[in-house]
Image: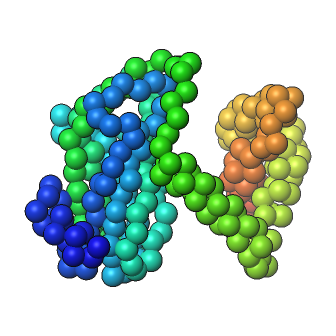
Amino acid sequence: MKGLFLLVALLGPASASAGVAVQVLETDPMSPAVLGHWESFYLRIGYETDRPIRVRGEALFEGKPVTSMTSGAPLHQAGTGDEMFWFAYTAPARVDRIRVWAEDERTRQRLAQSEISVDLTWTGQRTEAVRRPPEWVERFKAEQERRAREDAAAYRDRPTSWLEVGVFFAAMWSIPIYFVLQIVALWRFSGGWRVAAVLPAVPMALVLAHAIYAYYAGSNLFPLWLVFTCPPALIYLLVLLAMRRLRRQAG
């Protein structure tokens, strides 16, 4: 199989560095094809590598990339194997060429590349008919789901450092502290200081409204934007408070 990959890489529409080769083996559906809203075009990609790589791809039309949703690029260790890669669109789109490549995990350098010509059209319309994918697509889907579960479990069970715990609790506590300090600043400041204190209040009011809406909509992620935006807003108010105190002491 090693010799076959290197021969195809040299003779076919592909480029490869020593020890690394990548090639599209089959697709689903076959080209030409018309696909609907969120309907995926699958590629089975064979690879051979002597180092850790990620297999990536992009869709093009008339030489220009056509931005799409993709399946991501899992890490592959040295060896020979195959991987599934998919593209999907929600809006109308056309694709006439697909490029795949092997990327060095450490340097992010493209080590091998291959292209295929296709004739694909996404209508942007939802289709009622459900097309049954071939066995290899189902097999790779099951493998990707298993890999995702293992990665999630490994991340969940990893040792947590005191720094991570501290950052998490600091971000959570910044939410109530910010809103209390914001109210105090608007109440006690006057003149230009009050104007400066209003600056974070306007965008933070929108973030709070979004969080309340998400909560009543049943989202479990309703405080997410507050967690990201309250720490910088709190730091801004603390700096403003320190500057005001220093100015008053100097005066």
Image x and y of residue 131, in percent: 51, 30
Task: Give above or below for 250 relative to 99.
Answer: below
Residue 212 in sight here: no
On the rendered image, what quadrant is the N terminus found in?
A: bottom left
Residue 50 in sight here: yes
Image x and y of residue 171, in percent: 78, 58
Q: Residue shown at 86%/57% (left/top)?
A: 173
From the viewer's perspective, tell me whether residue 170 is left or right of residue 120. right
Task: Give above or below for 171 relative to 137.
Answer: below
From the viewer's perspective, tell me whether residue 249 is left or right of residue 47. right
Image x and y of residue 91, in percent: 43, 24
- In the displayed image of the protein, which residue is found farthest to the left? 11
From the viewer's perspective, tell me whether residue 163 is left or right of residue 187. left
Q: Residue shown at 37%/74% (left/top)?
A: 80
On the rendered image, what quadrant is the C terminus found in?
A: bottom right
Among the 4 quarters of the image, the one containing residue 59? top left
Among the 4 quarters of the image, the one containing residue 8? bottom left
Task: Give above or below for 12 relative to 110.
Answer: above
Image x and y of residue 172, in percent: 83, 56
Foreground of the two, 115 or 159: 115
From the viewer's perspective, tell me whether residue 31 is left or right of residue 179. left
Foreground of the two, 14 or 167: 14
Q: Residue shown at 56%/18% (left/top)?
A: 128
